[in-house]
Image (spheres, grey):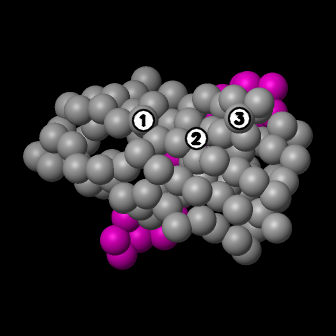
Amino acid sequence: QVHLVESGGGLVQAGGSLRLSCAASGMIFSIYAMGWYRQAPGKQRELVATITNDGRANYADSVKGRFTISRNNAKNTVYLQMISLKPEDTAVYYCNRDQSRYIDDYWGQGTQVTVSS
C-alpha cells in the first residue's frame, strides 16, 4: 500500500527558504515520475513541479527560478528546495506521482508552508 509522508514545512518570512521532503513507501519509487503539488485555502490543488524517474524536471511558471525539485531513488525520497519565498506560496504542499501520467486517489497529509510578508 502506497504511503507518502511530506515534511519540512513551516513559517518563514518573505524571501526565506525551505526544503521539503517526501518519503515514499509501498511503491517501486524509482520507476515513477513524481511531483509536488500545493493547495492554498479556497483554491484547487495545483502543480508545482515534476521530475521524471531519471531526473528531468519541469516547473510551474510561478515557481521557475525559485524552486528546485530533486529525488534520491535510493532513499525513495523526493525533495523541493524553495528559495525567495513569497506570501503567495503559502499553501499545503503534497507530493505524489506525476498526475499528468497517473491518477491517484491517495494523497498524504501534506506539509504546511506559510510565508509572512
Give neighbour class at mark 2: few <14, some 14-19, many 20+ (Cα, 10 Å): many
Residue that mark 2 sits on: 49
Amino acid carrying label 3: it is Lys
Residue that mark 3 sits on: 75
Determine whether the residue tagged by mark 1 lies in a helix, strand or loop: strand
What is the CA distance from the residue labelled 3 to the residue labelled 2?
Answer: 19 Å
Determine whether the residue tagged by mark 3 lies in a helix, strand or loop: loop
Q: Is residue 10 left or right of residue 49?
A: left
Q: Is residue 14 in the magenta section?
A: no
Q: Quadrant of the N terminus?
A: bottom right
Mark 1 or mark 2, earlier in chain: 1
Residue 39 screen position, x and y as percent = 44, 63
Give neighbour class at mark 3: few <14, some 14-19, many 20+ (Cα, 10 Å): few
- In this view, the residue in front, 85 or 6, is 6
Residue 1 position (above or below residue 68): below
Residue 72 position (above or below residue 33): above
Determine whether the residue tagged by mark 2 lies in a helix, strand or loop: strand
Mark 3 or mark 2, earlier in chain: 2
Segment colored magenta: 40-58
